[in-house]
Amino acid sequence: MSKLRLLIYCPAVGAPHGHASGQRTLEFAKSLIRNNVDVCLASPYLKRSSTNENLDLFPLPKDPFRITHQLKNHVIQNKINVILERSEGGNIMSSGYGVIIGKIMKIPVTCEIHVPPHDLRTRIISFPWLRYSLKNSEKIFVISQNVAALLYLHHKYCKDKTVVVPNGYDDSKPTCIDARVEKIKQFLPKDRKIIGYFGELNEDKGVAMYLS
């Protein structure tokens, strides 16, 4: 069996409006490398071609007509055998290219939908590329049942290949607690469970998991 050589296409990496999302993708790629997976991370917003953790970064042009050509060449030269596309509602014009290359090169493609478009205008604009990505992906990963339900509502054909992988955290990394937090703890009830959550409090992020 040949070694897994993964291309992650995520237009949020390096994008000024996608810092948090891009950072999560970078950390995910690094964790795969630590597990002996060859990973290349491609984005039109990258400004460098390598990191200090053996992560292959592939900067792409912002011109959509050149992205496809350069991605295809990179897949051939690096013998990529799996593609993961991380689709973002905020990067509509840069999305879908990982799936397109996968279909052209007959390479298995998985798609991660972080947050599907909510407002009517974005849904109308993004519908063609989102439908294409979903129909041509072998597996679709989402972070909550709410996101899955939204996808099923508009794209019923993806139900059988959607997998919910909830957000998590790395408990091996120590967390520094500010002295002010220690002071606040004095006033918290001792007979109740207290849950601290840092992030967007919305259903798409799967916050309800903490309560179940």
Image: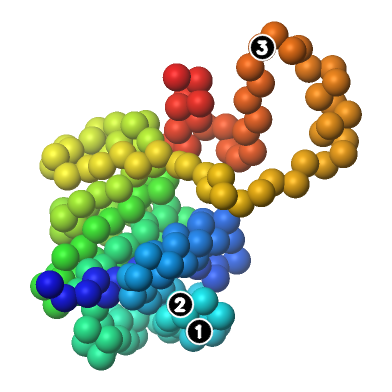
Alpha-carbon span between mark 1 and mark 2: 6 Å
- Seen in the picture, residue 151 relative to 130 is either above or below; the reply is above
Q: Amino acid at mark 2?
A: Leu
Return the residue at label 1. 50
Nearer-the-camera pick, 90 or 27: 27
- Seen in the picture, residue 118 relative to 140 is either above or below; the reply is above
Across and down, in percent, residue 1 comes to 12, 72
Return the residue at label 3. 192
Q: Residue at x 47, y 37 (%)?
A: 205
Q: Are marks 1 and 2 in contact (CB under 8 Å)?
A: yes
Nearer-the-camera pick, 150 or 102: 102
Q: Secondary structure at mark 3?
A: loop
Left or right position of 210 against 184: left
Q: Amino acid at mark 1?
A: Ser
> Who comes first in sequence, dot 2 or dot 3?
2
Alpha-carbon span between mark 2 and mark 3: 44 Å
Alpha-carbon span between mark 1 and mark 3: 48 Å
Across and down, in percent, residue 6 comes to 29, 71
- Seen in the picture, residue 183 relative to 16 is either above or below; the reply is above
Left or right position of 146 against 185: left
Q: Residue at x 36, y 57 (%)?
A: 87
Q: Amino acid at mark 3?
A: Arg
Quadrant assignment, res 86: bottom left
Left or right position of 76 against 60: left
Crowding at label 2, few (<14), some or many (≥20) Cα neighbours within 10 Å?
Answer: some
Q: Residue at x 81, y 24 (%)?
A: 185
Residue 52 in sight in this render: yes
Residue 55, label in figure:
2
